Image (cartoon, grey):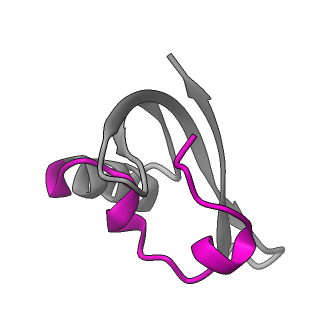
Amino acid sequence: MWGYQGLGETLGLPVETLWSTDEETERLETSLVEKGWWVGELVGRRKDGSNFDVLLSANVVKDRSGLPVCVMASFMDT
């Protein structure tokens, strides 16, 4: 979907590079911090700079003590 080839190009990539605007990144991050989840449509930005619509479902994964460990997300193009 994003046009990257393999993990070598994506590991450590700042999440801000995946979305077309900083506002979309902020909206997603705020919801994850406040609610622990987010579902909705965003405009993604491919490696080549082109935009596309994506449906995102994301959840914060916590360990047994309730501390956040990672974010699990699935994407579907629309």
- Residue 42 visible from this viewpoint: no
Is 74 left, or right, of 26 in this rendering?
A: right
Residue beneath the point at 35% across and 64% down? 17
- Residue 44 visible from this viewpoint: yes
| Residue 75, x across and y down, in percent | 61, 36
Is 57 left, or right, of 30 in this rendering?
A: right
Residue beneath the point at 41% across and 62% down? 33
| Residue 8, x across and y down, in percent | 69, 79
| Residue 68, x across and y down, in percent | 63, 74
The image quarter containing residue 9 is: bottom right
Residue 20 colored magenta? yes
The image quarter containing residue 61 is: bottom right
Considering every residue shown, the one lying at the far right of the view is: 64
Residue beneath the point at 52% across and 53% down? 36
Residue 30 colored magenta? no
Above or below, comparing residue 8 to residue 62 in the picture:
below
Residue beneath the point at 37% across and 53% down? 48
Question: Which stretch appears magenta?
Answer: 1-23
- Placement of the N terminus among the 4 image quadrants: top right
Front residue (pair 56, 5):
5
The image quarter containing residue 74 is: top right
Above or below, comparing residue 25 to residue 6 in the picture:
above
| Residue 21, x across and y down, in percent | 18, 50
